[in-house]
Image (cartoon, rainbow, N blue to C red):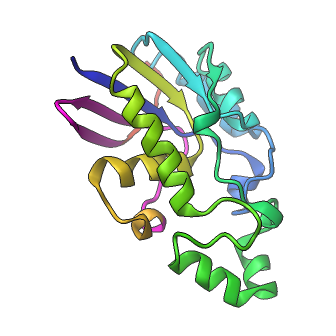
């Protein structure tokens, strides 16, 4: 049995454009229009999931997908840094930011560590491998990063070296104890 999982990154939002740690905002007008124009560009799926974040739910809706929220696909919890830019946090807590970027197990911001999100998403992928058919999941970029780290067996330190563009599809196919990966296909009007 081959399991197919397509991870779709959300369209743009104000926090994404301003390089702020996600604060729960919705799509901006341009992001919503781009997502609506890409409706119908994904293959039909037997299961459609979404991160609980508003921009993922809104992206799914704009793509014409009726998604069910999946707790395992939640965004990385940024704790007290939520809503702030990396520049602001680095100015206020330079040692903390340096350690956070270098140590995947560190989460002194009061949220979730990179290692924790990689483990959570990796565990979800292992259960998804046993799911027949195609799954489409609209998820935050850090969930896509964590999935790539898992399927390639990369160390969690590689997490920050992976860029995920808005409104792209990362496609995974799993069988015989391994995953294959296709990265960053832009979603466009069919």
Q: Nearer the viewer, residue 56 or 167?
A: 56
Is residue 155 visible in this depiction of the protein?
Answer: yes
Q: Is residue 162 rendered to the left or right of residue 181? A: right
Q: How many marks?
A: 0
Pinpoint residue 67: horizontal percent, then vertical percent.
62, 18
Magenta residues span 160-183
- Residue lying at 51% horizontally and 61% vertically, measured from the top left: 115
Give the camera-side residue of 22 and 41. Answer: 22
Residue 42 at least partly seen = no
Q: Quadrant of the C terminus?
A: top left
- In the displayed image of the protein, which residue is found farthest to the left? 176
Compared with residue 177, is residue 39 higher up or lower down, i.e. above or below? above
71 relative to 140, above or below: above
Residue 160 at what x, y percent from top left?
Answer: 48, 67
Residue 179 in which image quadrant: top left
Q: Quadrant of the N terminus?
A: top left
At x 76%, y 35%, the residue is 54
Would you say residue 53 sits in the magenta stretch? Answer: no
Instruction: Tell me if residue 163 is in the magenta stretch.
Output: yes
Q: Is residue 21 above or below residue 152?
A: below
Residue 80, given in percent of the width and then of the height, sits at: 83, 65
Residue occupying image coordinates x 77% and y 66%: 110
Q: What is the x, y in percent for residue 104?
A: 52, 70
In-image side of 55 versus 164 (left or right) = right
Identified at 56% across, 56% down, the residue is: 116
């Amino acid at each position: 049995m081959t399991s197919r999982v397509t991870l779709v990154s959300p369209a743009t939002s104000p926090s994404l454009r301003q390089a702020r740690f996600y604060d729960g905002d919705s799509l901006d007008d341009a992001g919503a229009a781009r997502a609506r124009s890409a409706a119908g560009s994904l293959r039909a799926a037997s299961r459609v999931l979404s991160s609980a974040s508003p921009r993922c739910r809104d992206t799914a809706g704009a793509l014409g997908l009726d998604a069910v929220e999946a707790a395992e696909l939640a965004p990385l919890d940024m704790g007290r840094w939520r809503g702030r830019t990396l520049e602001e946090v680095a100015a206020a807590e330079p040692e903390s930011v340096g350690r956070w970027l270098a140590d995947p197990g560190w989460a002194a911001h009061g949220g979730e560590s990179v290692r924790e999100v990689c483990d959570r998403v990796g565990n979800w992928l292992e259960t998804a491998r046993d799911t027949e058919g195609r799954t489409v999941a609209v998820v935050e970029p850090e969930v896509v990063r964590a999935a790539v780290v898992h399927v390639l067996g990369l160390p969690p330190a590689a997490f920050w070296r992976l860029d995920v563009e808005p409104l792209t599809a990362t496609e995974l196919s799993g069988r015989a104890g391994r995953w294959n990966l296709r990265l960053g296909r832009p979603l466009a009007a069919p």
